[in-house]
């Protein structure tokens, strides 16, 4: 029987009813890993759907040479080797399970596959992926969190052929900080602000700070960031150098304006170089924060990296002195952390921080 030209490949090998589109010009150019993965899926789709393509037909479909197709077939054979019961039925596929059918005039699979893992993932890799997935788990109640989890499951499913995490979830567990608040419009706000950043457009928002009335503001969005599951916008007041950090949960009625602004080119990491939390601080403190911990808390305080430039010194009696490069803007978040250590932490300096914490303690004691 004469060979037939293959039809267009399916985008998802597990759903052969959907037809994939070839590149706009009909040819895959370059030699990138992305092109390679695309060709692998195209070729496997042709085999899975029993179109019996030969090397010439596959080369025409993928816009490459027959030599490249030969290498791709070898890659598929290698990737298929060892696929077990879940994908291939009884037993594992061998590297000769792609054969040339002389009667049909093209290649075929000796056995049917329900899916095709594009990579073989070892246990140490799955541990890393399991950790990343668990990082997303606390945020599943938020719109952005659900979107990222769906995207992760989809991508990992395509690459490995499974999204079954039950065995790993029973054996390994990661605990993260408190569950973030559920923002009803966080995806909508994210999309709008991201668009505004890319297009350098001023945004009008209604914002409700803590202990203040809601007000309408015009802001120039610089970048978005997340901490402990909560999303924030770092921005400037429109036409002003003053910068602010605004929380998504306090933003409402966000809308793009036609006004544009000149962006402030910056690396977000630089903005938080000397930050303790969400308050940006780019400048190293002239007088660092110095805290001494008693013997009872020394190990717990000293075994955590609070900042890459921290210094830890052992003290007589088993205590430790912790030096952190934080300045005045960070005290808002630093004070609750220091108070959480109770009597096991003593502020050595700077004086301004010591006086602020002392005032808070006196007020707390007066309210008891």
Image: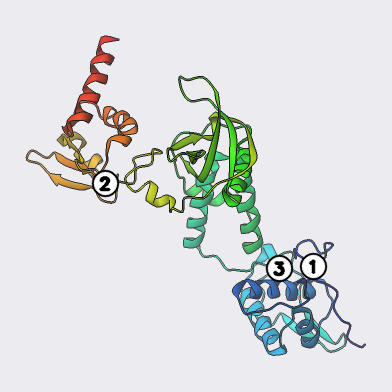
Vertical side of 153 occupied by 318: above or below: above
Q: Nearer the viewer, mark 1 or mark 2?
A: 2
Is residue 146 visible from the viewing direction of this image? no
Q: Which of pointers 1 and 3 lies earlier in the amino acid sequence?
A: 1
Q: Mark 2 = which residue?
A: 284
Alpha carbon of mark 3 to alpha carbon of mark 2: how far?
59 Å
Q: Callout 1 environment at 10 Å: few (<14), some (14 to 19), or many (20+)?
A: few
Q: Nearer the viewer, mark 1 or mark 3?
A: 1
The spot of residue 187 in percent (x, y) is 63, 40
Alpha carbon of mark 1 to alpha carbon of mark 2: how far?
53 Å
Of 197 and 67, the residue lying toward us? 197
Is residue 244 visible from the viewing direction of this image? yes
Alpha carbon of mark 1 to alpha carbon of mark 3: how far?
27 Å
Residue 88 disc label: 3
Residue 275 disc label: none
Q: Who's the residue at 46% across and 39% down the image?
A: 240
Of 78 and 254, the residue lying toward us? 254
Q: Who's the residue at 19% across and 39% down the image?
A: 298
Circle 3 SS class? helix
The N terminus is located in which quarter?
A: bottom right
Vertical side of 24 occupied by 102: above or below: below
Q: Mark 1 = which residue?
A: 21
Q: Nearer the viewer, mark 3 or mark 2?
A: 2
The spot of residue 345 in percent (x, y) is 20, 31
Of 227 and 127, the residue lying toward us? 227
Q: Who's the residue at 82% across and 85% down the image?
A: 106
Tell me which corner region of the image, top left, top right, bottom left or bottom right, holds residue 54.
Answer: bottom right
């Amino acid at each position: 029987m004469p060979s037939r030209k293959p039809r267009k490949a399916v985008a998802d090998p597990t759903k052969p009813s959907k037809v994939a589109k070839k590149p706009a010009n009909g040819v895959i150019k370059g030699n990138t890993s992305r092109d390679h993965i695309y060709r692998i899926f195209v070729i496997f789709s042709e085999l899975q759907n029993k179109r019996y393509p030969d090397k010439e037909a596959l080369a025409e479909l993928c816009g490459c040479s027959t030599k490249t197709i030969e290498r791709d077939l070898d890659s598929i054979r290698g990737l298929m080797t060892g696929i077990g019961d879940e994908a291939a039925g009884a037993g594992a596929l061998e590297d000769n399970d792609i054969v040339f059918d002389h009667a049909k005039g093209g290649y075929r699979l000796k056995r049917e596959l329900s899916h095709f893992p594009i990579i073989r993932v070892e246990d140490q890799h799955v541990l890393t992926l399991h950790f990343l997935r668990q990082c997303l788990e606390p945020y599943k109640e938020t719109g952005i969190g659900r979107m990222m989890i769906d995207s992760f499951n989809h991508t990992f499913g395509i690459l490995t052929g499974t999204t079954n995490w039950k065995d790993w979830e029973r054996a390994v567990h990661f605990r993260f900080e408190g569950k973030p608040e559920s923002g009803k419009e966080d995806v909508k706000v994210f999309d709008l602000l991201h668009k505004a950043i890319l297009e350098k457009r001023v945004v009008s928002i209604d914002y409700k700070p803590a202990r203040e009335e809601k007000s309408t503001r015009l802001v120039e969005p610089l970048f978005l960031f997340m901490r402990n599951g909560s999303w924030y916008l770092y921005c400037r007041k429109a036409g002003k150098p003053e910068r602010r950090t605004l929380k998504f949960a306090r933003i409402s009625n966000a809308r793009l304006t036609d006004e544009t602004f000149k962006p402030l080119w910056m690396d977000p990491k630089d903005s938080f170089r000397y930050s303790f939390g969400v308050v940006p601080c780019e400048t190293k403190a002239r007088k660092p924060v110095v805290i001494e911990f008693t013997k009872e808390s020394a190990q717990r305080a000293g075994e955590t990296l609070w900042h890459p430039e921290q210094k830890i010194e052992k003290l007589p009696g088993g205590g430790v002195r912790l030096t952190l490069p934080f300045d005045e803007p960070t005290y808002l978040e630093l004070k609750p952390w220091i108070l959480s250590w109770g009597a096991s932490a003593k502020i050595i300096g700077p004086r301004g921080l010591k006086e602020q914490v002392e005032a808070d303690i006196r007020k707390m004691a007066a309210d008891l």
